[in-house]
Image (spheres, rainbow, N blue to C red):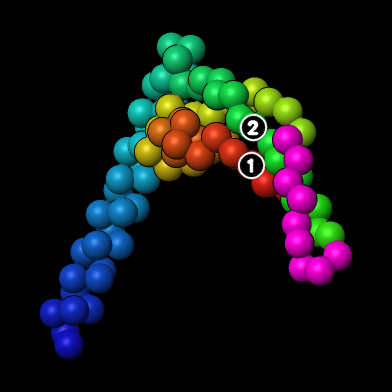
Amino acid sequence: MRRIGQALVVLGVLLVLLYVGDWLVLRVRVSHGTAYRVVSVNQFLATPLKGNKVEYDLMGTMPVTCSRSIFPQQGDPACWWLEKHTAQWE
């Protein structure tokens, strides 16, 4: 049981170090002007109908700013994740 606790502490420390390193790399990219990118995202509206049915409407394509990082940074999603999830539902 003690080894599991130690392994969890080590894993937590490694995750914090990875996040801090990701933030530092993003700061360097910001200073060079290469930290952000724009990805086109399709927005859909789900409208509930009678009889437990749902109608899906395409609202349009919208450009979304993303950060070139592993984790979401500065309130923007990570580009690698956003490029794989180009549909947003409302």
For the residue pair 38 and 85, the one nearer the viewer reads as 85
The 10 Å Cα crowd at callout 2, few under 14, some 14 to 19, many 20 or more, is some
Q: Kindly indicate the quadrant of the structure image that contains residue 42.
A: top right
In the rendered view, would you say 71 is above or below 6?
Answer: above
Q: Secondary structure at mark 1?
A: strand
For the residue pair 7 and 41, the one nearer the viewer reads as 41
Tell me: 65 left or right of 84.
Answer: right
Q: Amino acid at mark 1?
A: Gln
* Label 1–label 2 contact, CB within 8 A: yes
Q: Is residue 52 magenta?
A: yes
Q: Kindly indicate the quadrant of the structure image that contains residue 21.
A: top left
For the residue pair 29 and 40, the one nearer the viewer reads as 40
Q: Is residue 57 magenta?
A: yes
User: What residue sits 75% from the left and 57% below the top?
Assistant: 54
> Alpha-carbon distance for marks 1 and 2?
6 Å
Q: Is residue 72 at least partly visible in the picture?
A: yes
User: What residue sits 30% from the left and 45% below the top?
Assistant: 18
Tell me: 89 left or right of 18.
Answer: right
Query: Which residue position is annotated with label 2?
Result: 42
| Residue with the most extreme right position | 50
- Residues shaded magenta: 50-58
Give the mark nearest the N terminus, 1 or 2: 2
Q: Amino acid at mark 2?
A: Asn
Q: Quadrant of the N terminus?
A: bottom left
- Which x, y percent locates residue 67? 49, 29
| Residue with the most extreme bottom position | 1
Q: Total label count? A: 2
Q: Main secondary structure of the magenta part?
A: strand
Q: Secondary structure at mark 2?
A: strand
For the residue pair 10 and 82, the one nearer the viewer reads as 82
User: What residue sits 51% from the left and 39% below the top?
Assistant: 85
Residue 88, label in figure: 1
